[in-house]
Amino acid sequence: MSSILSCYYSAWHWRTSDMDYMRRLTPTWVRIHQPSARAIANVQAVSPDTKIMLRSWDIDDNNGDRKRELYANPLAAARAHMDLWGAKRTELRMELERSRLPYDESKWYFGLVNEPDPAYLPQVVTYTLEAMRIAKERGRHLGVIASSVGTFGKPGEGGNTWDLAKPLEGPINDGGHILIAHEYWQPEGPSAVWIDNEGKERSDAGNLAWRHKSIPLNVPILIGEAGANGYIYNRHSAQDDAGWRKFMQPEQYAAQVKEYIEGCDSRVQGVCLYMLDFHSDQWWSFDTEPAMEELLAIKDTRPAQQQPTPPPPTVISLPIVVGPEKPPAPTPPAPQSPPSGIVDPLVLEAILAIESGGAGFGPDGRVKIRFEAHIFEAQIDNAEVFAQSFRYGKPAWTGQKMGIGAAWLPIHTGAQATEWQAYNSATYIDPEAAAKSISMGAAQIMGFNHARIGYPSAQAMLQAFRNPNVQVIGFLNFLLSDAALWQAVRKHDWREIAARYNGAGNVDVYSKLLADKYDELKAAA
């Protein structure tokens, strides 16, 4: 069983003791600051099941530049920051492969802007929604919000409180993302009462430590930074250099960490102690190496608290943040229980007829596919590599071509041979990205929806779809995973079906095809 007690690893230098600690701890999460290929490979070698939250200072902070970009234009900032992560991801993968280091990218998560100002929470929500929309297209998982210790406001306190973040709940769950919060406590301990500089009694419980209990979102939570910190409220230091080592012995610190983990609620998936190593003298007092044995002794500690009952829903009027481009379409809701009742079988038959002519396999017996070059470009995040092999027009789903020698040949010829030729070419660049970029089977479900219909990867989905019965199951799971889509099927709402099944880009054409096919089938029945 992986440990909720997790690690914040700065990765500026490598210590054998750090890797031995991770091997023995088997943490659920490791948060790597300034990730390098070597740091990622080291973590995955000693603890292969650990999820890795990547944090890159130049992408999430850069002397405050990234925050200012977010506050000024959240939509443009989300797109720019996701592109920065795309370039960083490519750089890390290339270095891993050049160095012949094994890695498992399915465990990687990418962190957004770190510790945003609560005064800009509406912009943060808009930014996060857009980043999650892009992540869904590219098959990425994100760490979102990364709130600083003691922020945002608790529900009911007025101002920019966590209530405003409620629109993030569905997309976080739907996209497999995780919410990050930072929680520290005074050296007296997470639940201790202490006296501030004005002689007033204070307690960190529920205010700094365990503040996540006031977050009214039913989502997984990663405590991305945690620990004893005497810098809070400027009690012991003028700069953030007052970690646990200035105040206590390892046994005392481990006892405080145990108390904190037990007091977390059941949404918390990991508690990353700040920090496993340090890159400058400012941070030496936070280094957990001297307490490794004591911390290993509490590695099986689990949150003892159930998730608190959320407060009554609050009607929120979220300000519209105007950017230079049209805001994105709303992110589809998280899967819900579909309404009861059967559907008209001719509607399902019409969908299958329009998607694939009702056939799940081509003339050569292979699964029927359609390769989408523009989706593949988004999946690999490498425009230079993409341009050497593929092209597309405007709109992006038109004019798609593949480079064969010196020639550029069309992909969508109506023949399965060219679709498979394009797909096979893409697998030489990135096999999983290639599988995510094809629609498959009679229902033509995109590979990037593999998790939605129950498969661990797009390649596993393609393999399973060699069985015609599995294609039927996949079609049903796709419909049932979206209550609004299922309702639209029951109501014969062709435009809603078109938008939710094939996206918002070609609703007029696709909805008419569906309606006409349905009328044709009904007339022949």
Image (spheres, rainbow, N blue to C red):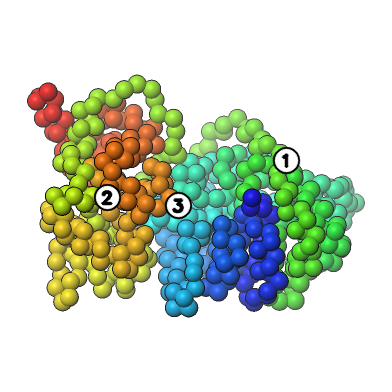
Q: Label 3 sits on what residue type?
A: Met
Q: Label 1 sits on what residue type?
A: Ala
Q: Label 2 sits on what residue type?
A: Ser
Q: Are the two marked residues, 1 and 3, in contact with CB atoms closer than 8 angstroms? A: no
Along the viewing direction, whichever of 364 and 244 lies nearer the viewer: 364
Reading the image, the residue beneath label 3 is 132
Picture mark count = 3
Mark linked to residue 304: 1
Which callout, 2 or 3, points to the residue nearer the camera? 2
- Would residue 455 be seen by someone viewing this image from the given angle? yes
Which callout, 1 or 3, points to the residue nearer the camera? 1
Mark linked to residue 89: none
Q: Earlier in the sequence, mark 1 or mark 3?
A: 3
x and y percent of residue 99 in the render? 48, 78
In the figure, 452 relative to 8: above or below?
above
Q: Would residue 509 be found to the left or right of residue 326 on screen?
A: left
Q: Earlier in the sequence, mark 2 or mark 3?
A: 3
Q: Residue at x 68, y 75 (%)?
A: 15
Q: Earlier in the sequence, mark 1 or mark 2?
A: 1
